[in-house]
Structures are given as structure tokens and as C-alpha cells.
Amino acid sequence: MELSELQAKANEMRIDVVRSIAEAGSGHPGGSLSCVDILTALYFADVLSHDPENPGWELRDRFILAKGHAAPALYAALAHAGYFPREELMTLRKWGSRLQGHPDCRLVPGVEVSTGSLGQGLSIAAGLACGLHSQESNACVFALLGDGECEEGQVWEAAMFAAHEKCGNLVAIVDSNQLQIDGNVLDVVQVGTLAEKFAAFGWDVREVDGHDISALVDVLSACKADRGIAPHAVIAHTVKGKGVGFMENQVGWHGKAPNDEELKIALSDLGVEGGIDG
């Protein structure tokens, strides 16, 4: 896709995120909207090797949504990529739907592992990367974490393991939007400078504007191509609630669905004429 097409795709995904959460009456819009551009770069710019018609393709790259509460964004990416019909997004969190509040790999094609318990995703990704490396596979493993999630001790155990095992086929992307459910990340627990911390654990570290799709494609592609001995950490600086003015940088929109009036305003911000998505 051309850059303009990727940007349009990201906007369409944001529309689906806010609509599906509003329809469900619950969900996590803030952290879903902040990571849409990252997912767009992965799934639609030939960074992630995957096949919607064969989700279990042996040579595929693996993607792990460590911050599982951002499932609406992942579901939007998978639907737009062709893993399931886009209209199914409106069944989010409804009784009997396979699109649960956190992704379930037993139900949803394209979901590698079930996630949602914060701190565990990077451990799973590191184990996958180590196993694929031992099999001399060319597949790469990408894991998307939240910066608040990096307060979990298990993240750093996984970081030590991945560096020790020389998992050069592992890329951890941190959606660094500075907010978590209880407030500003720095006010909850001082995690320090994440770039410096990952570097101290032996990782190759790169930083990027998490809403610059072109820059994201460049840095993620470079990490994938670099199969040295160090795992890669990409600190993506983002805005929580990106694209919806009244949600941006507002901790209150971590886990709350918009009402009908708020949905109209959100859709208007995203370019839907009259705030009504037809």
C-alpha cells in the first residue's frame, strides 16, 4: 500500500474501534486507538509475513498482543486483513461472540495466543522466538506491550531471557502513551527511561513516533532484517485515544465506552460526515 492508503486504512480501523466499543457498551478505547498505526504498519505494509487464508502457515511471523485489552484494535486489523468479516466487529463482547474482551486464540483466526494478563506476553514471545531460532526458522516474533505493562516484573525476566538466548528474531514494541488505568505511568511506578532500561538488559533499542506510519514501517522492517544476537525493542511514542479529540491524553478513556452523543463526536473527528457512520 502507498502511505496515503495506509493512513486511510488506519482511520478506517479507528472508526471500527470506536463503533465496536460503543456497540458493546464496554471496552478499552484509549489504548486501542494509540496502537492502530503500529498495527497498520505491521499488517498492511508488508512488514509482518502472514496469510489470512492460511492462519497456521508455518513460515508466518508471529504477533503477540501482550496488552490484550487493546483487542478491538487487533480485531480491526485482522478483519481488514481478511481473517474474518468486518461486520463481525460489531459483535465485540456480546454473548456468544468469539470477539471477547481479550483475544482468544482458540476462537479467532490470526490470534497466536490468548492474552490479557499483563506481563506475560513478552515471556510467550521470547519463548516462541527461542523455539523458532532453534528450528532455524526465518520467522520473526513481534510483541506489542504497553508502557504501564512494563511495570510488571515478568517483563524484565523475559527481557533477560531473550538477551541471554540471543533472540535476534524478537521485536518488542512498546506503545508508550504515558497513561495507564490508574493515571500517568510515571506517577504510578517510576519505570525509568524505557529505552535505557531495555538497552541495559542487552537489547538493541530504537525509538519512533508511533503515529508516523512511514517511520514505523522503516524501523520495524529494519529490526526484522537485523538477525544479530540482540533482541530488538522499539519504543513507539504515542497518544492515548489518538484520533478522537476528547479522548486524547485522557486517562478516563482507558476503559470506558462512548455513549451515543460521544460516538457521533468521535466519528466526526475521524472524518465521518455528520458523525454518523453509514
Image: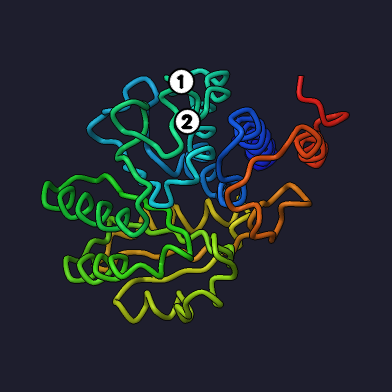
Q: Is residue 212 left or right of residue 126?
A: right
Q: Secondary structure at mark 2?
A: helix
Mark 1 and mark 2 in contact? Answer it, CB < 8 Å: yes
Mark 1 lies on residue: 84
**For residue 48, which quarter of the picture?**
top left
- Residue in front for this viewpoint, 3 or 256: 256
In this orientation, which residue lies closer to the viewer: 137 or 55?
A: 55
Relative to 226, residue 115 above or below: above
Per the rendering, the mark at residue 135 is none
Q: Amino acid at mark 1?
A: Phe
Name which of mark 1 and mark 2 comes first in the sequence.
2
Image point (76%, 32%), residue name? 260
Q: Residues within 10 Å of mark 2 (few under 14, many from 20)?
A: many
Q: How many marks?
A: 2
- The residue to which callout 2 is attached is 78
Residue 106, image x and y in percent? 28, 28
Q: CA distance from mark 1 to mark 2?
A: 7 Å
